[in-house]
Amino acid sequence: MFKLKVDKSKHKMITERLNLTETENYTYVLTTDKDQVESDKVNIVFNEAEITRVSSLLDWIVKGEAIYIVGSNQYGDKRTQSRNIYYFITAGDDVYGVMGTIRMRVTYKLYELEELLQDKDFIRVSKHAIVNIAKIDYIKPALNSKLNLIMANGDTVEVNRGYLKSFKEALDY
Amino acid sequence: MSTLFNQPGLLFLSLVFLGISIYFIKRFIDELQWNKRLNNKKKAMRIRLPRGQQRNRLSLLLTGAISPIVLVIVAVVASVNLSGNTFEVVAFNSGDDILDLYQTFEENYRSSNNWFMMDGAGEPAMDFAEENLDVTSGDQGSDDYSGTNNQVVGVDEMDNVVTDGKYLYIAGNGEVKIALAYTQQNTYQVLSLEKELDYNVSDEVCPQSFNTKGLYVDDDYLVVIGSYYQNYCYEDKEEDDVVIDWWWGYREQDVTVFVYDKQDDFSLETTYEVAGNFLGTRKIEDDLYIVTSTHLPLYQEDVNIDDYLPHYIVNSMSVKAKYKDIVYVDGVAPNSFTTFYALDLDGKQVDMEVVLGDSGYNLYVSPNNMYLAGTLWPQRTLTDDLFQPEGDERQTAIFKIGIDGPNIEFDQYGKVPGTTLNQFSMDEYNGTLRIATTSGRWGEDINNRVFMLAPDLTIISKIEGLGKPGEVIRSARFVGDYAYLVTFEITDPFYVLDLADPTDPTVLGELEITGFSSYLQPLGNDYMLGIGFGDSEGGTQGIKISVYDIRDKTNPIVFDEIIYDYSDFGWSYTSATYNHKDLLVSLDKGIIALPFSSYDYSNDTYQYNSGILVFGFDETDGLDVKGYVQHDANTEEEVYVYKSKFIHDSASDTTFFYTISNRYIKVSTINNPTNILQSLMLN
């Protein structure tokens, strides 16, 4: 989503510092030279010394406005940014959001969460679960054309066959 | 790769491992792709990637994927090294190299089956008593006489009684007796003892004895082969008297060869001594070949290989083998030196080829090659235990030594499954070695096979599953394009195999009869003589002499047979069932003769009868008993008649028939063998 136009010798260093994924289908042009701006793109001309601030800016651009989810458990109500939730899962009629070792019941239906979080890189993986891609640690293909997602907290969430295609598309951004 | 197909167990396991490997590889690639997508996605999401964990997981998968392939490769390579016909010859520079090799071998193989053989050391006494008796006629002998019953035309085999048409040479008890048997002038009447060569050394406190193994005779030379052995002695001191007692020992020493010049009144021309225990010998024209083995006690501490290094002595000149000339085939148990010697009787030169490895015992010699076959006991590696838990089939190891007159050279090493029966299990024809083996011991496990081996001893083809379940090969004979094979457990299937196409051997015909033949000898192209066991009841309690009609190879039939039931004699046997050289066969003279002894206990007395059974043979009447030549009938003393020879007198067109026992030489004619014309007492 970004194109970096800087001195070649510094290209690698800056890419790493900015934690940047460059692509041919880019919307943003990042450059240290104002002559390099491209007319039909969003151009960010920056000074190398401000690289940390640029990185924060990029974070803001990519991650967008935070969405807050409200849920409750035995300790009471909790409000948290959606990015802190590892996955949502249904148990009976209830929907739970799992954060590390904490699990809280949310009042949304799963399809409502899917719609709400579609720009936040949450993806539906089965009838019962929506996962936060950012919290997937590892993908283990299973024997039966399913996938097991090992989440950052160690939990395993299964990707059902019917959702495999959309899951793949979500990863292929 | 052919190794894999020859070992179904290994092939199956390889396929299983390959399957596992493919599964893991697929899984590895799948996981790699998914997680690469995930990582790219996370990167696009500007999330720092967790490090280490993924890499570990993928490394594990990759190991899982590659390990089975590596294991299969290791197994195949190890298996090829152990059982394939490709072999590696290892060079040595010193005895320490051999000790190092032994250590490595012991470490590599879980168990090694050593054959412990006695080995000799020290110098044998070279002196022997020579006693000249009266020299009688200098007249010529006959050109028409019976030679040794050799397996291969042109390759002479050693025997304990030989003749050259004039003299009979008889070896035994550490001496050789030379009897004048025939001259053109006085025919059989000259029968007399001409000379005795006594090799025993009896003037020492602890005597050395000579084991005369056999003789060769040709126009120029009489060759005596034997080994001195040291008796075990001990001193028994009683007060002032010292009593030396001794008994026969088996500490046999190196092989000694005495070569006598026939033209010079049997004067000793050359004495050869070749190191090792006697395994076998052949003679082709003036070249004498001897094979010996020297066991290496590598399990002993401080063993000095130099002491066991093969050597030869020609008229007191000694030559030792050089380490660099020793051939070792990698993977063979380095337990002994097998030494092939070629003695040029004319040139008085010796060529020596030393092979380090388990020695063989069945020697087959064609005009061009020596083949020594021995049992290769399973040497199991860790890989074998993993992949072939049941695959400990015994194999036959074959050393092939090329012959070029007095020069010999190690040529090939090969292996086939199963074990050989005797020298007749092998035959070389048009460069192809045919070899019959039996593997397994019990019931369904037994597999009788005939392998066709290329000059490099790789297997070209095979016939297997010969015989009924449980039957083993009892005799084999290869004649030109055909092989004749007898297997036995209850009945005697006599097989005719067509080996004309080495790539496609086939079973042509089969005959099933009772009893079995333990020795087969062709009678011309149309008949096969079988000497073996069989009785009138369909069992094996008797001696059976059979003649098979093999004119129709697809349908062999019994042409004639004669059975001697044990029950008629008490007990009887013929050495021709196991020693083909005791059998006299001449189609030309129409005679088949073999030793036959019986031992009967009746009326409270033992009766021992020993003699030569004589048969006439022709293609119309088959076998016809001509008589039983005995030297002493119904004695309690054992006069063992063990050999028969004939010498033809062309002047009277009479063929004289000589029978030899431990006490007499008796002469008759083959037309009337029981009518003894003259007798000579030997001792």
Image (cartoon, coloured by chain):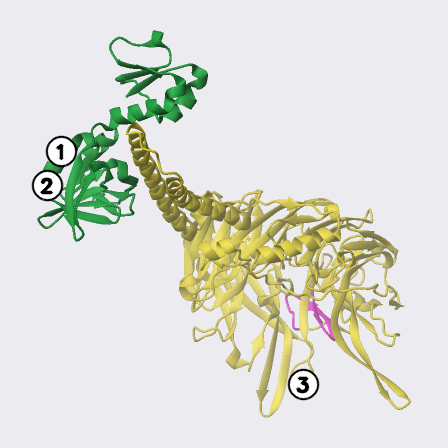
- In this rendered view, identify the residue nearer to me: B83 or B163: B83
Q: Is residue A159 visible?
A: no
Q: Residue furthest bottom?
A: B604
Secondary structure beneath dot 3 equals loop
B503 vs A46: above or below: below
Q: Which chain identifier belongs to the yellow chain?
A: B
Mark 3: few, some, or many residues within 10 Å (few <14, many ≥20)?
Answer: few
- In this rendered view, identify the residue nearer to me: B576 or A79: A79
- Chain A: drawing colour: green
Residue B573 image-quadrant placement: bottom right
What kind of residue is marked 3? Glu
B294 vs B10: above or below: below
Q: Residue at x 21, y 32 (%)?
A: A121
Residue of label 2: A108
Q: In this view, does B658 lie to the left or right of B575?
A: right
Q: Which chain carries label 3?
A: B
Secondary structure beneath dot 1 equals helix
Residues shaded magenta: B657-674
